[in-house]
Amino acid sequence: MNLLRPLLLCCGLLLGGCTGIPDGIEPVRNFQLDRYLGKWYEIARLDHSFEHGLSDVSARYRLLPDGSIEVLNRGYSAQQQGWKEAIGKALPLGDSGTGSLKVSFFGRFYGGYHIAALDERDYRWSLVVGPSRDYLWILSRERELPPRLRQLLVDKASALGFDTSRLIWVTQERPDA
């Protein structure tokens, strides 16, 4: 059953227009991929089976020689007493100045990764949405965000139609994260 779950998730994304963006949401413009590369900490998310129960979640984006982006997602499972990792591949969607990527952890099956809000000056935080309003992440270059900024991003997500009462606030306490 463990192998079946990712396959069903992937098929569901595919049939639902997996690289699309929810109605009424526009990805950021003037996006600079080279500034987005590097490590991001997951501050909050809408929970899914592929991240359920994980703490200290991070994502690292690295440009590969062929122009694609390696995505390394990593989180700690207290239940399994160890790290879970997934390596994927991302490609820009549309023009390079738009904050939209398609990301795959399952070969040719891609899902949408759209940056709905971004600290355009310093690239220190971002609000990322998937192909539907079931996918939402608040990311930061630091392990924590100031409470006022957290609330600003929650308010932005709520205004975009996300059920922010379902947000999981991710702990970032492990020194080996």
Image (cartoon, helix red, strand yellow):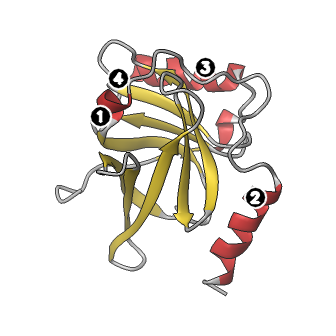
Q: Are marks 2 and 4 in contact (CB under 8 Å)?
A: no
* Mark sitting earlier along the chain (4/1): 1
Look at the image and tell me whether residue 52 can be seen.
no
Q: Position of residue 153 (x, y in %)?
A: 52, 23
* Mark sitting earlier along the chain (1/2): 2
Towards the viewer: 19 or 96: 96
Furthest-bottom residue in view? 1
Callout 3 amino acid: Lys
Q: Which residue is mark 2?
A: 14
> What residue appears at the point 30 percent right and 48 percent down from the top-left corner?
62
**Quadrant into which the C terminus falls:** bottom left
* Mark sitting earlier along the chain (1/3): 1
- Tell me the distance, in whole angstroms, between the alpha carbons under discs 4 and 3: 16 Å
Q: Nearer the viewer, mark 2 or mark 4?
A: 2
Q: Are marks 1 and 2 in contact (CB under 8 Å)?
A: no
Towards the viewer: 64 or 55: 64
- Tell me the distance, in whole angstroms, between the alpha carbons under discs 1 and 3: 19 Å
Q: Which residue is mark 1?
A: 141
Callout 2 amino acid: Leu
Q: Nearer the viewer, mark 3 or mark 2?
A: 2
- Tell me the distance, in whole angstroms, between the alpha carbons under discs 1 and 2: 30 Å
Q: Which mark is residue 146?
A: 4
* Picture quadrant where residue 132 is located: top right
* Picture quadrant where residue 163 is located: top right
Look at the image and tell me whether residue 36 can be seen.
yes
Q: Dot 4 surroundings within 10 Å: few (below 14), some, or many (20 or more)? A: few
Q: Is residue 35 left or right of residue 98?
A: left
* Mark sitting earlier along the chain (4/3): 4
